[in-house]
Amino acid sequence: MKPRYPFRRTCKEVSALLIAREDRDLPWQDRLGLKLHLAMCEACPAFERQLLTMRQAMGRWRAYTEED
Ligand SMILES: [Zn+2]
């Protein structure tokens, strides 16, 4: 049986947390898990950047449609 680290998150969990973070504040355990995972993973920071880019694009799109 593998040892279970309390703050270890899988990529799948991390991507779900990154999406959830857009809508609500995460408990500190999840924030710490995210931080630790992002520090050692290559795929998830790239996914985080994609999310940020998407959110910025959405913000611009909203500002644009509200002008009308
Ligand atoms: Zn990952």
Image (tube, helix red, strand yellow):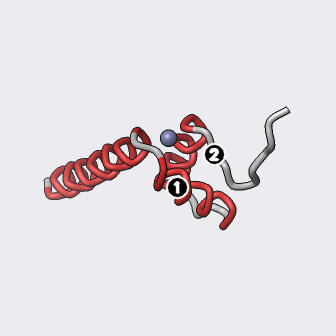
| Between 9 and 54, the one nearer to me in the picture | 9
Secondary structure state at the residue bearing disc 1: helix
Where residue 58 appears, as percent x and y from the top left, is 27, 48
Q: Residue at x 31, y 43 (%)?
A: 50
What amino acid is found at the position of numbered circle 2 in the picture? Answer: Arg
Q: Which residue is disc 2 drawn over?
A: 9
* Res 32 → quadrant: bottom right
Where residue 7 appears, as percent x and y from the top left, is 69, 55
* Res 30 → quadrant: bottom right
Q: Mark 2, residues whose alpha carbon is within 10 Å: few (<14), some, or many (≥20)?
A: some
| Label number found at residue 13 | none
**Residue 52 left/right relative to 40:** left
What amino acid is found at the position of numbered circle 1 in the picture? Answer: Arg
Eye-nearest disc, 2 or 1: 2
| Between 44 and 39, the one nearer to me in the picture | 39
Q: Which residue is disc 1 drawn over?
A: 21
Q: Residue at x 32, y 51 (%)?
A: 55
Where residue 54 appears, as percent x and y from the top left, is 29, 45
